[in-house]
Image: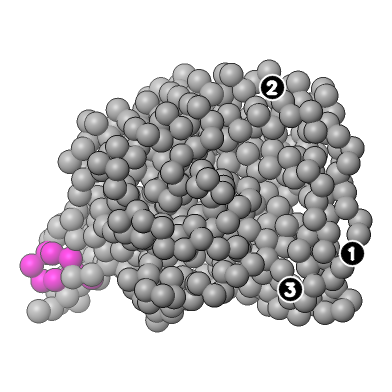
Amino acid sequence: MATEKITIEPVTRIEGHAKVTVHMNGDGSVEHAYFHVNEFRGFEKFCEGRLVEEMQQITPRICGICPVSHHLAAAKAGDVVLGAPAPRPAELLRELMHMGQVIQSHGMHFFELGGPDLILGFDHDPATRNVVGLVQADPDLTLKAIRLRKFGQAIISELGERSIHPMFAIPGGVNRAFNADGRDRLLAQIAEQVETAKVGIQVIKNWCENNQEDVNKFAVFPTGYFGLVTPQNSLELYDGQIRLTGRDGSELEKFSAQNYLDHIAEHVEPWSYLKFPYYKKLGWPEGAYRVGPLGRLNNCDQIDTPLANAELQIFKALNGGKPVENTLYYHYARMIECLFALERAEVLLQDPDILSTDILNTSRDLKEEGVGVIEAPRGTLLHHYWINEHGQLTKVNLIVSTGHNNYAMSKAVDEVAKTYVKGPMVQEGMLNRVEHAIRAHDPCLSCSTHAVGQMPLEISVFDSEGKLSQVLRR
């Protein structure tokens, strides 16, 4: 049967650039849809030869959306290779900065990037299916969302003197102590932001209740789940062991990030520059897993803050205690984590050690290699450095959150296209749903491929004879 191809390029309201090709049969049904990450990855190679102490300033330039995640992962890898564990007060301050990153990133994605599709509708006019449309539809909610992100950015800037590319964490600790005035400024704002997070949670719960048919058919499929946990298997975003659970929710492995290569391999497909990590023991593709908010909440047993834990129990009941497989529930999980980050920030700010000046370990005991791990907003981030006797990098490996989710995004794109895209006249709202299959995961393609550039969006629809039948532009 003859086929036609629809190209969506670039996918919008994500960080970085990608395209989707939808291959259609002559009868208007979808044969297969592919998620192509078409940026080139070169960041690891040009870090070779640099001093490991430079990496916490170099790697944040990978991304302006989540620079803190790379900043902290690099510093943690530096702790290991230089043999300089950070003192407890420095770890508290690093984690506090990380909570700011989670708050601002999750808040921005839910309300400004993913939210327009949900709040305004997948078929809403694309000219205003964005923050402008949100302001017009609900100015009060939009202002609350902006203040939530502003608070997360304030945490980062209070510690690192600026909210983008902060200069704060260094191997062995941090470079400046916190002060009581900054602590009190942040504490005074938390109650308001907790209420905003609760509003966000209610927004997504109401939407899911009113759109349950879509929730139940929009890319629902089994995978494993992967992320950091505490020794008691509670949700952990800053440090801990990596836990991998299977499709039925049972634990498959729990291991130190230093040993990740014993458990993870990477698969390659010819249609994407982005690799596909998977669990070695199950092989490809059975060993594919999901990370990020949905992955983490399926992977943990509880959350160690009361409000978020209460919401987690509601989340876990959605599928009768089994893993929640619905892609659209990424948004619900994201806001539960945002609430946790706010509660956790308050705990950290109230810890007496947060104002301590014991913030740096200057001892050195060089190791040949070391791994720094953190739960970036989008999922587990691994920085693996190898150094020589002078502390220069001889090799760098970065497995970024978006990479872990490559299988899930590709699977979601294919399933959503087959469910919603129908020919011969393809509507823009159908293609927006395909984009949202990626957008729900909140990918950071600059992180995963490290390229720059801009591309226009033009969707050309060709009929089964190869003739141009329809063009959609933004």
Q: Nearer the viewer, mark 2 or mark 1?
A: 1
Amino acid at dot 1: Arg
Q: Work out whether residue 406 or residue 178 is closer to the camera in this orientation and state it.
A: 178
Crowd around label 1: few <14 · some 14–19 · many ≥20 (10 Å): some
Instruction: State if disc 3 and disc 2 touch (CB < 8 Å).
Output: no
Mark 2 or mark 1: whose residue is earlier in sequence? 2
Left or right: residue 223 compared with residue 156: left
Residue 152 is one of the magenta-drawn residues: no
The correct choice, above or below, for 332 with respect to 5 in the image is above
Q: Which residues are magenta?
A: 23-30
> Regarding mark 3 in the picture, which secondary structure is present there?
strand
Amino acid at dot 2: Leu
Amino acid at dot 3: Glu
What residue sits right under mark 1 in the picture?
Answer: 364
What residue sits right under mark 3 in the picture?
Answer: 369
What residue sits right under mark 2 in the picture?
Answer: 187
Q: Nearer the viewer, mark 2 or mark 3?
A: 3
> Regarding mark 1 in the picture, which secondary structure is present there?
loop
Mark 3 or mark 1: whose residue is earlier in sequence? 1
Label 2 vs label 1: CA separation? 36 Å
Q: Position of residue 233 (x, y in %)?
A: 50, 47
Residue 27 is one of the magenta-drawn residues: yes
> Regarding mark 2 in the picture, which secondary structure is present there?
helix
The correct choice, above or below, for 247 with respect to 353 in the image is below
Residue 405 numbered mark, or none: none
Q: Is residue 435 visible?
A: no
Q: Work out whether residue 341 or residue 262 is closer to the camera in this orientation and state it.
A: 262
Q: Position of residue 239 (x, y in %)?
A: 63, 51
